[in-house]
Image (cartoon, coloured by chain):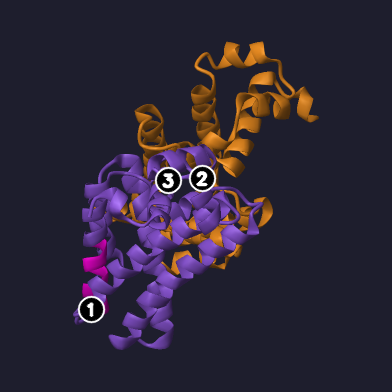
Chain colours: A orange, B purple
Amino acid sequence: MTDTARPTKDRLILSAATLFRTRGYHGVGLADVLAEAKAPKGSLYHHFPNGKSDLAIAAATWASDEMLRLIAASFDGAETFGAGATTLCYKLAKLFDKTGWDTCPVAATLFEGPDNTKMRAHAAHIYDGWIAEVLDHAERLGLSDRDAQSKAEHLFVLIQGGWMLARARRNSDVLRRLAHQL
Amino acid sequence: MTDTARPTKDRLILSAATLFRTRGYHGVGLADVLAEAKAPKGSLYHHFPNGKSDLAIAAATWASDEMLRLIAASFDGAETFGAGATTLCYKLAKLFDKTGWDTCPVAATLFEGPDNTKMRAHAAHIYDGWIAEVLDHAERLGLSDRDAQSKAEHLFVLIQGGWMLARARRNSDVLRRLAHQL
């Protein structure tokens, strides 16, 4: 499938995700997204009536869905929580090496500042969704409720903080070391 | 000291730090900084010949110095590494409750994207400076070289990731729980 064979809506979301990731919410104009997606202006407002903020939420959701798939692929078939968590950290390190040192669109919408309650709430919803996904696996793998909750949140915190340090250093080694901390 | 009694250079740095923190690097224009700092344009280019990028580096350094003071205040007088780390997490939670849910200017310069090598390198320098500061305390408090290095990096990762989750949730509880993970 060539890039223009994707539906316009998908091209808009992917373009927005890429642009927000590299330049932050405020660094991107709708004209940039339209140019990157090779899409007409009318289509943007058709799919995203509130324009940029709707697009940011869609881009963050798209990136989050990718992360949920990565979590599922890491924990499915894992025999212990530690094994699943280790696989996830290694997969993220590999992703980092492949995609470079960008941030993710989830963080890019969050960094838009404290005024936009809707976006902040969406980021919280997304992050808690990742934690809930890990929690399901933790419980399936026999951890107690309390331990599962604590370990799922801990893994999230490690991944966020580790990704940030990896970005600053442009080196994914820290991501591979994370699993030892659980 | 009223705000205008500060030297112009300091007012420019503080204003830039506040604005980058809330709006991100791309969301801030030099005119915004000048207005916030109540400073003339000539003074900005006198102190920061490269304009916005110089200002971003100065703002990140200023924020980093605050963090180094917080680390020192937490570990000075601590009798164990765990006690110092716990104090630091509680102090950060208090700071979060006081200042709200902004990001820090260090992250704001980082989020400017992958193209600016100078800024990215400065962020890495700052982050490794925090880790080095914690490492000194870890060694003083009797941890082995390897354990000290691992724990200092782990604490950094926890704090970065925890702050991000606290921001999304607008709730500092996760920061207080971090110390249990070390």
Q: Earlier in the sequence, mark 1 or mark 3?
A: 3
Disc 2 target residue: B41
**Residue B124 point in image, percent of width and height:** 53, 65
Looking at the rendered structure, the kind of residue marked 3 is Ala
The span shown in magenta is B81-89
Residue at the image point whose x is 27% and y is 52% from the top: B174
**Residue B19 point in image, percent of width and height:** 42, 43
Q: Is residue A84 magenta?
A: no
Q: Kindly state the secondary structure of the residue where label 2 is placed.
A: helix
Which image quadrant for residue A30?
top right
Q: Kindly state the secondary structure of the residue where label 3 is placed.
A: loop
Disc 3 target residue: B39
Q: Kindly state the secondary structure of the residue where label 1 is placed.
A: loop
Answer left or right for A132 relative to A96: left
Residue at the image point whose x is 42% and y is 77% from the top: B132
Answer left or right for B15 relative to A70: left
